[in-house]
Image (cartoon, rainbow, N blue to C red):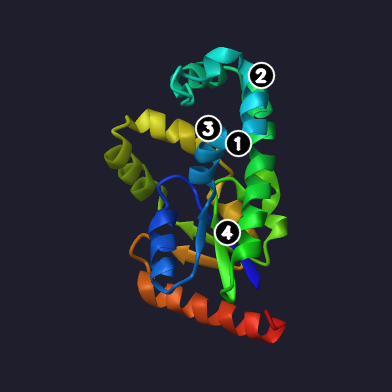
Amino acid sequence: MLKVGITGGIGSGKTTVCRIFELLNIPVYYADDRAKWLMQHDPDLIKNIIDLFGTSAYLPDGGLNRAYIGKLVFSNKALLAQLNKLVHPAVFLDGERWFAKQTSRYAIKEAALFYETGSYQQMDKMIVVTADREERIRRVMLRDGLEREAVEARMDKQLPEAEKIAKADFVIYNDGREMLIPKILEIDLLITDRSRLKGG
């Protein structure tokens, strides 16, 4: 079975693309959602987070104290890097266990930081979803209720789109340049043919 990664900058619409793949019966692992789940259910990860941030990292009901952690890491890049060093390996292992259970010819892992973390190297193929910067800004402002400056600040922390596209096996332009569903069907066919050749 082939492992396929999907990534894209904030506002690119990669979740929409993943939903269409799911309609084709392709299983999708949403790394960011699983990270949130693991931070509240993985005993080892919880212990490591408490060791890093103290007991205030969790609320009395066991939920993650996002406001507290967010405030600490917002202005402390070193602390954010330490948190990522705890979370990313846990998500990677969880993802590998998930892939091992899949029976389809290929399965997809969706993550925002594939290239930033180097985990794209563990995938057989990479898909980058992209859109015009102004369109992405508009989407995020509408979706999250953020000011333009806040959206641009988030974008500037991510790897430039051009670098992601240069490393991709497939690129989906999700801003009206091309029909989305036909492009996904085309990629599905190409990946499926490759998986047959591989015998997976």
Q: Is residue 125 above or below residue 192?
A: above
Q: Which mark is residue 40?
A: 3
| Label 2 neighbour load within 10 Å: few <14, some 14-19, many 20+ | some
Residue under the point 55% across and 36% down: 41
First-in-chain label (4 vs 2): 2
Secondary structure under badge 2?
A: helix
Residue 47 screen position, x and y as percent: 65, 25
Q: Identify residue type, mark 1.
A: Asp
Q: CA distance from mark 2 to mark 1?
A: 15 Å
First-in-chain label (4 vs 1): 1
First-in-chain label (2 vs 3): 3
Secondary structure under badge 1?
A: loop
| Label 1 neighbour load within 10 Å: few <14, some 14-19, many 20+ | few
Q: CA distance from mark 2 to mark 3?
A: 15 Å
Residue 149 quadrant = top left
| Mark nearer the viewer, 4 or 1 | 1
Marks 2 & 1, CB-CB < 8 Å contact: no
Residue occupied by mark 2: 52
Q: Quadrant of the N terminus?
A: bottom right
Q: Is residue 36 above or below residue 132?
A: above
Residue under the point 61% across and 28% down: 46
| Mark nearer the viewer, 2 or 1 | 1
Residue occupied by mark 4: 165
Residue 157 quadrant = top right
Q: Identify residue type, mark 2.
A: Leu
Secondary structure under badge 4?
A: helix
Q: CA distance from mark 3 to mark 4?
A: 34 Å
First-in-chain label (3 vs 4): 3
Residue occupied by mark 1: 42
| Mark nearer the viewer, 3 or 4 | 3
Residue under the point 71% across and 58% down: 122
Residue 91 screen position, x and y as percent: 62, 44
